[in-house]
Image (cartoon, helix red, strand yellow):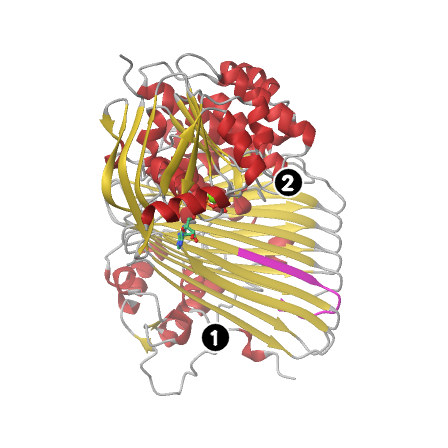
Amino acid sequence: MSMEPIVTVAREKAKVKNAAWSDTGKDHFLSSLEKFRSGMNGQWSGLRRDAASRVRELGFPTSKHEEWKYTNLLPVLTTAFHINTDISDVTAADIRSLLPTGKDTELLVFVNGVFHETLSTLNTGKEVIAGNLAAFHTSENVNRHLSRYAPVSTEPFVALNTAFLSDGAFIYIPEEKRYDRPLHILHLNDGRKMPSMSHPRNLIVAGKGVSANITESYHSLGTHTSFTNVVTEVILSENASLELTRVQTENRLSSHISFTEVRMDRDTQFRTNTITLDGNFVRNNLHIVMDGTNGSAILNGLYIADKNQVIDNHTLVDHASPNCFSKELYKGILDDKAQGVFNGKIFVRQDAQKTNAYQSNKNILLSNDAVINTKPQLEIFADDVKCSHGATAGQLDEEALFYLRSRGIGLEEARVFLNIAFAAEVIRSVSNESLREYLMRIAKMKLRKEI
Amino acid sequence: MKTPILEIRNLQTGVEGKQILNGLSLSVNAGEVHAIMGPNGSGKSTLASVLAGKAEYEVTGGDVKFFGESLLEMSPEDRARKGLFLAFQYPVEIPGVSNANFLKTAVNEIRKSKGLQPMDSKEFLLFMKEKMKIVEMDKNMTQRSVNEGFSGGEKKRNEVFQMAMLEPQLGILDETDSGLDIDALRIVANGVNALRGPERSFLVITHYQRLLDYIVPDYVHVLYKGRIVRSGGKELALELEEKGYDWIRNETENVKV
Ligand SMILES: Nc1ncnc2c1ncn2[C@@H]1O[C@H](COP(=O)(O)OP(=O)(O)OP(=O)(O)O)[C@@H](O)[C@H]1O
Ligand SMILES: [Mg+2]
């Protein structure tokens, strides 16, 4: 059996260009890479060089590309973004206003992809490491794992991120450590002075038997456009358990593309929450490979969008081993002309007997112009499996709306109640209490059109 | 002379082209309890829904004044804020919305419209505790989602609890007694009686005299084919219990001929 059809099949170098790919944006990114490179240290120059040539070979997908057909990348590909490494403008107050987590949280702050040491609470003890990747570029764990999993040769935005590889969060928790303090990686794209892009790279390595809770949050500031193109690689060793929450509250001038690549060894538990409450254009790619038996993956997602927002979630759960369990629930609330995309792939390999895989995508459309394109894709090569999937799109329950209004609650607030009730199913699965409260608050603000 | 708080004049409504209320008139003064009885399908719940502001019913004629204002023009929330409350015959379940949470918003919306300060969480909890006693409401029911998984009787009790919380000027009870066991019937009826007062009126829709043993009405009306065909004192309910609706039917049909 071929292991290949999992990710977008790359166009071979020699093949003629077809309509699914274009050179738009290539020159621009590559020339800003030239400028950027001069300021970089020597580490990872090989990785960067190879990735840059991959960008040159691939180009970028057009809307004719099956995996990108609802997504207009042109605004991203044609804007003259800068990499602004001068991060001295950002103050503690800026960060505090954005910060969703509580005081007990260990915080790593990155601005435009650059590590902001004074705003971070570093932990670089002998055992647990929570710091920035660049500072650990000689570490064995970084060398062993960095860029080993993310599909750099097939995905142009992963290649682009790797071509710009310079820093991001590095979290390493060695064997048998419970790490009780929540860890928070905060990425801020600062568009206050110029159109800004960043290519942060995060690496999370959970050793055997480790238990941890990590949040990545993405924000932007300013009146210029911003583009964040992040890659996160996550490695769960045997028996490890990790909750990874991604919070996206960038502003309406922001574009965001993410690739999260997860490898699960045997007996691991992974719970991930992808919560998108703002941003002009967001495309999340979440790719989970269950490499060992008895793994459990829970994928929760929530997107609340209005006006012209486009929120696109592509997920893939690859059941490559027997006896694994996955459960996916993505919920969306779309108003005005907002567009949602959900593409959920589940692969069950031939050897992956006794797989249980469930997927569900539920949407509320608040206006006639809001659109959801939802597509489950199940490819099952084993015979002893339980799989199900379902997708719904509907309106708010009129009876329930009337009930709330008949108690004196105004129409708008009654809508917020019902929408929040719908969204809460996902928000509740975030176990960090202060983060959960923050998400509830922002979700309500979003539904009241206060953001 | 008293001015009625609710005055329904020649109300005609339909849904999907079907006429349901055919010229219904009724006046309710402050402090009065009016019972409305009538066979299944005669239009009792339709009347309640139209008064509460349910959009699917189309008013084709007549008008309704509530404290002298034209009720039919108001949004459902404004009607509630002005003191109208409907205890539904079939309360909906609203998963994910907690009873206490939504009631706090409702209470404060109504206070706001009366020019009162909103209650803070502590005040609200005390207030709620007090009102829970009225219908002997179980504490965990307020924490649960609105009516979700509630038994039929619990739903009805929750309606009366909400009415106690919102302290309306006019409470409309649509078959709040149906589905209640004997004890619950007594509790709910006592709850309603506790809310009775010179400034508060009730429209009690019921099929059974038994409720009216507890909530003694000032007037009893019989609704038949979308009109009130007979009104009387509390004895009328006893008469109906005894004779059924046939005599009313016969009389009404005969009058028509
Ligand atoms: N939304 C609707 N669509 C169609 N017909 C309706 C609707 N609502 C009410 N009706 C019809 O109008 C008539 C009156 O209904 P209504 O529910 O008001 O009766 P009721 O007096 O409350 O009866 P019951 O004692 O059974 O509760 C019935 O024939 C019913 O089928
Ligand atoms: Mg009825």
Q: Nearer the viewer, residue A402 or A384?
A: A402
The residues colored magenta run A314-329
Mark 1: amino acid: Thr
Q: Which residue is mark 2?
A: B151
Circle 2 chain: B
Mark 2: few, some, or many residues within 10 Å (few <14, many ≥20)?
A: few
Expressed as whole percent of the image width and height from the top left, the position of residue A313 reads 45, 60
Expressed as whole percent of the image width and height from the top left, the position of residue A152 reads 48, 68
Q: Disc 1 on helix, strand or loop?
A: loop
Expressed as whole percent of the image width and height from the top left, the position of residue B250 reads 44, 47
Residue A365 is left or right of residue A320, and the answer is left
State the quadrant of the N terminus of chain A: bottom right
Mark 1: few, some, or many residues within 10 Å (few <14, many ≥20)?
A: few
Please determine whether, in this image, residue B123 is positioned above or below residue A89: above
Among the 4 quarters of the image, the one containing residue B1:
top left
> Does the beta carbon of the residue at mark 1 sit less than 8 Å from ligand 1?
no
Q: Nearer the viewer, residue A276 or B108?
A: B108
Q: Are marks 1 and 2 in contact (CB under 8 Å)?
A: no
Residue A257 is left or right of residue B134, and the answer is left
Circle 1 chain: A
Residue A328: in magenta span: yes
Q: Residue at x 75, y 64 (%)?
A: A293
Q: Nearer the viewer, mark 1 or mark 2?
A: 2
Mark 2: amino acid: Ser
Q: Are marks 1 and 2 on the same chain?
A: no
Residue A421: in magenta span: no
Q: Residue at x 51, y 68 (%)?
A: A151
State the quadrant of the C terminus of chain A: top left
Residue B131 is left or right of residue B74, and the answer is right
Q: Which residue is mark 1?
A: A8
Among the 4 quarters of the image, the one containing residue A33:
bottom left
